[in-house]
Amino acid sequence: MSRSDASGDADATILECTDCIAPAEAFALIGNETRLSILEALWAADERPVSFSDLRRAVGMRDSAQFNYHLQKLTGHFVVQVEGGYEFKHAGEKVVRSVIAGSFNEHPTVDPFPVQGACASCGGPLRAVYEDERLGIECADCGQRHGEYGFPPGGFNDRTAEEVVDAFDQRVRHLHCLAADGVCPECGGRMETTVAEEGSCCLGVGVRVDHECAQCGHALCSAPGLRLLDHSAVVSFHRERGVRLDERPYWTLPWCVSDEHTRLVGRDPVRLEVRMPVADDELRVVMDGDLDVLETTVESAD
Ligand SMILES: [Zn+2]
Ligand SMILES: [Zn+2]
């Protein structure tokens, strides 16, 4: 892709494809053991660029002409020749990352395991369930779901069950934050946010937020409260009452996973109200349809 000059026209896209290749062609280029080995050798190198001969030695191929043939197939799209040798292009680095993340070649089976917290609906014990590279939190008693999200097999490497759920919690928070800010976590495309009352999702809540990418169709949903986890008024309301929102998994906060504390108080324009009770006090937050906070009010019992 090359950058065109975005002169004046605000609607002009700033990128246009001049040397792009079709996805099938891209997969064909890397669908070869030697070429994957070249990318992995480049990744493992202490320093880049890596010279032709060092790269060939690392891959362990004697036939220089044969090696060069494969290297040339990668050059341009996945690697680039610079002074002193070869260096990654972004696409090449992404391929190696995907292999490391394990999505292309690992299919681990993980038995459900218990996690911290109680069901927002019945108070039963919660467990993590891993299926089809998605991790979900659900109630072991009533089956009520507390959200799920893609979690690459590589995330299980070198982690205890507790560390896995901690990583999952972080991942959900960050990816939903990105989505609510309008950026697709998968492709970087434009993400649309809508407040929905109908249909079901991985949460079983009546009022939820749907994010969908206009470019790749990637979709995720959440309870409206999830958006508030790092809002300053929400964070300080809780901190002043001894609750650190960054130290507990999102599913242990009822307003992040159930709609007991969430109400749609206006449809045109959309107004959402989330109530967060802590001890005798309650924080009331009003958001608009873009999940921007319009108002926060602390209500104390006395
Ligand atoms: Zn339950
Ligand atoms: Zn996308």
Image: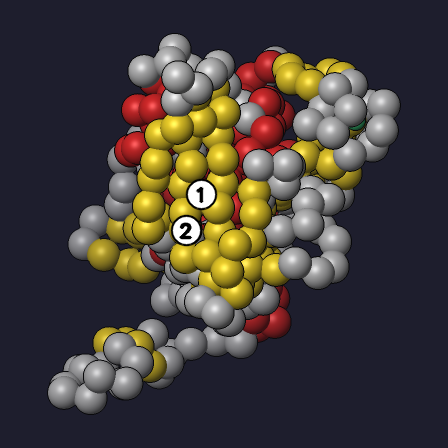
Does residue 155 sit above or below 62 in this rendering?
above
Outermost residue, right direction?
A: 141
Residue type pointed to by label 1: Arg
Tell me residue 180's x, y (percent): 43, 53
SS for callout 1: helix
Give the residue at x 37% y 80%: 17
Q: Are marks 2 and 1 in contact (CB under 8 Å)?
A: yes
Relative to the observer, which residue lies in front, 67 or 122? 122
Looking at the picture, which amino acid does disc 2 mark?
Met
Q: CA distance from mark 2 to mark 1?
A: 10 Å
Which dot marks residue 8? none
Q: Where's the N terminus, which quadrant?
A: bottom left
In this view, the residue in front, 129 or 137, is 137
N-terminal label among 2 and 1: 1
Check disc 2 and report its element: helix, strand or loop: strand
Dot label at residue 227: 1
Q: At x 39% / y 22%, what residue is drawn?
A: 300
Looking at the picture, how far across and down is residue 132, in whole percent?
Answer: 75, 43
Residue 243 or residue 186, whichever sits in front: 243
Residue 70 in sight in this render = no
The answer as to whether callout 2 falls within 8 Å of ligand 2 is no
Q: Nearer the viewer, residue 246 or 67?
A: 246
Q: Position of residue 52 (x, y in %)?
A: 34, 49
Q: Position of residue 200 (x, y in %)?
A: 74, 53
Q: Residue at x 33, y 45 (%)?
A: 295
Query: Residue visible at 48% across and 46% down?
Result: 273
Q: Which residue is mark 2?
A: 287
Crowding at label 1, few (<14), some or many (≥20) Cα neighbours within 10 Å? many
Up-down relation of residue 142 to residue 10 (above or below): above
